[in-house]
Amino acid sequence: MSREPRGKGTSGRRPPPPRGAQSEDPREVVAALTAAGLANAEVYTKRGRARRVELRGDELVFATAGEQGWAVRAGDRHGAFFRVGSGASLPLDGWPEPVAPPLLLPERQPVPAFSPPLDLDAPLIGESEASALLAGVARELDRELPGARLVAAAIDDGASSSALRNGNGIEVSWRGRVASLWLEAHYAPGGRQSGGFGTHLYTAAREARRLAPLALARRLADRLAVAAAPRRTWSLTTGEVVLDPAVGTAVLAALVPLFVGPQAERRRAGLVDADGLLAARALSVIEDGRLPGGLLASAVDGEGVPTRRSLLLDRGRALSPLLDFRAARERPGSPSSGCMRRFGFRDLPSLGPTHLYVVADEERTVASLLAEVRAGAYLLELTSGVVADPLHDRLELVARGFELQAGRAVSPLPEVRVTGSLRQFLRGVVAVGRDLAFLPLGGMIGTPTLLVDGLALAAD
Amino acid sequence: MDPARPFPWLDRGAVARALAVVADREGDDAEVYCERLAVVALAEGEGTPALEVRAEQGFAVRLGRGDRSFLASRDELTTAAFADALRQVARVQPRALPEPELAAPPILVEMDLVERMRGFVRAVHAALRQRHVAFPLRLALRCERREVAVVGPRLAPDPECEVSFAVRAELPWGRHGLLAPDLDATTADRLAAALATRFRAREAPPLAASSARVLVLGPAAAAVLVHEAIGHALEADLMPADGRLARGTVLAPPNLSVLDDPQSAPAPLRRQADDEGTPVLRRFLLREGVVDQPLADRRRAARASDLLPGAGWRGSRHFPPLPRLRHLEVLAGETSEADLVSGPDVVYAPLADRGLLDSAQGTFELGLPLAWQLRDGSRTGLCGPLRLRAPLASLLDRLEAIGSERETTGGYCAKAGQRLATWATVPALRLAGVDLWTP
């Protein structure tokens, strides 16, 4: 059940490839697909190298992976297929029979000028560098909070190059370079063997060697110190909450469905007021696939469509959601953006943000936000997932931080539950800080510190 | 790929000799793991493309020395890539490194599977019609064939092949999935029965509030409980360092024995050796309620004299192996199905959609998407989603009876982000005095 090339190809001049023939040239593959009556075709190739250093208890694992593979999406008027393989060579025949529905691929568009980051060529972190980074975090952590220890960690540092060609004239290539770090720490006051408190931290950078052990250790230590504080009963029916970017980004990530995809408007319909406002005027949200300095910045997306900056929320007013070209076609006048991501050669492109963030206020320091709080909490770390339910207008999360009174931290809160109306949360954003920070949460999601009013807080 | 004789072209002796040059110190632990994958997937309805065909191959070289492991993996099976990977893991560059010929032929994918999958979809829809139910349904099917060859410096078990079929049903009110050794009429009927029950339960009322209930978990639900609450707890890398689960610890009543035995899995999924090349064991995790032999890979077994290797499994060649379950078994009890559900107020849950063990706190939570209420063995009604949450030790103490008939089910385990097909042959379990709540 395979599609073999027609006798002379659509041009009448090109002979079919010999059975089992292969090629490393995407142009040849597209031509072979066309000759087989599969002119609706796209060829994607990817090559990459990644280094992973993992701390598991007392053991260190150093892994280097060489990734190389290809993916073909192709079809005719009636159907399509997705064919994937490893290695550098692609087949020129033996294509599967397409299955409905047919495939829609983008047309070639001019790609606006884009300057790729200058630091894509940095070498991957070495074994000794990685060991030193983890040892440094462990050492500084113990210094900041004696008895605290690093129990697990993983550094992933990778570089890749991709190329894509389709039957509609798109021929593009792009490169990537990203590192991530996962740290898990534990603290048992009194040196107990069991029980104790844990925390974790996940962050990303262009290169793993840019991550600073002392800063990471301090963040872990601060979180563990709060976690180990005595619990007490405390509540506010309506309070002011300051969200550290570690918490704000998780909330924004939970709200992505309100801003991305053709269903976004339907999802948020119940939250928009009579004036068409979804949120407070202090809140603006942007998605930018070519954000200067962005870790995932690229001229094109995973289908070769040019990326661009899209304003999704303008001072509280929701604008057109992030749409790929297929969804935009269904709505005349709606802008589309290159927003189809590919994680690897084995994956189909999927709709999603690259750098989605709350616009910062360069005039507001974190200290000035804290100073505005009469009674509330400063939340540093989530200890649960975020429940953001637009259908039932509900927001819920559990976090750690500090009780605030008259702008000052008065005591730690090892666990505080924040509940409220999602509508109230969005409208309750009083101010945003200038400390925009991105975290890897299914794309790079960014917020500065946020000051939000009108939520219920409870600790017990 | 020939499932009867995978990797016939691989010169395992030459690979072993090359590996021995790198693993040249006493105590070194090393292996080469080769895999070839063929996948055919078909999805109904919208979503492009509906047909996916994947053929990929590659390998990983691993060297363990002291408290460090070194892994080099590639997406190709070629001489040059193998030599490069060996040099990468070698701690000292050898003067001469044998370069065995690796000339892997193309992977053949069985495209006939597409028509079999279409036939299975028709069978499921027909089985639903026979049950007089109709609802929007999209089925996605996936057949995965994996050939594995593991070569150590001194040990090279025969290459093996696993074949599994995954089905995912997308419903307006959620998802339902199953893993099976074949797409046959029995599997289609079993899937239709589960979907019909879910359909009928979608608007079922919540369970009336009460505590200390009798809960009977059907085999599929019991498999999730045992996998999550006992299986993961007894994986050597997750066991608490304080010895709470050391060998000899009484963890459950004496009528419960739990094993892991990859050799007794359904035929297309049996394995004789793990992904480190170590022969597998018929391993009692719990023997009459007592911790006996936790799951361990070679590295952890080398550091603990009371652990045995043979349970090192990989989700992919790009990751090192971890101690994992492959085929969980619970020995059958003596209680008939009728006796399991006898009593004035019994809740019977045929399915579980999630199980979560909090090792640090020692608590376990099980999600049950639906349940039947029974009185004296007869069904009185269907109720909506339930949750069971309890300290693990006290939960197992509530085990009152074990069924005499076992069923085999499959699912995916995603420990440490590495997805792995896993199987269970388990009877129904009766628990007394449990608290259930409606989420």
Image: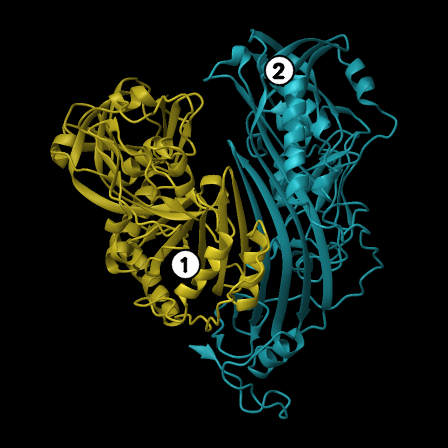
Chain colours: A cyan, B yellow
- State which quadrant residue A411 falls in: top right
State left or right for residue A58 relative to residue A49.
left
Q: Position of residue A254 (x, y in %)?
A: 61, 35
Task: Compare residues B361 and B432 and report the one nearer the observer.
Answer: B361
A248 vs B40: above or below: above
The answer to whether A225 is drawn above or below residue B140 in the figure is above
User: Is there CB contact under 8 Å for labels 1 and 2?
Assistant: no
Residue under the image location 69 percent in, 72 percent down = A168
Instruction: Indicate the amino acid at tag 1.
Output: Arg
Q: Does dot 2 land on a helix, a strand or a loop?
A: loop
Disc 1 element? strand
At which x and y percent is residue B264? 23, 49
Query: Badge 2 is on which residue?
Result: A146
Does residue A390 appear in the picture of this structure?
yes
Q: Return the residue at label 1.
A: B142
Q: Quadrant of the N terminus of chain B?
A: bottom left
- Please say whether residue A460 is visible from this viewpoint: no
The CA distance from mark 1 to mark 2 is 51 Å
Looking at the image, the residue that sits furthest to the right is A363
* Mark 1 or 2: the one toward you: 2
Q: Nearer the viewer, residue B242 or A215?
A: B242
Q: Position of residue A88 (x, y in %)?
A: 59, 69
Nearer to the camera, B334 or B178: B334
Residue B395 screen position, x and y as percent: 30, 23
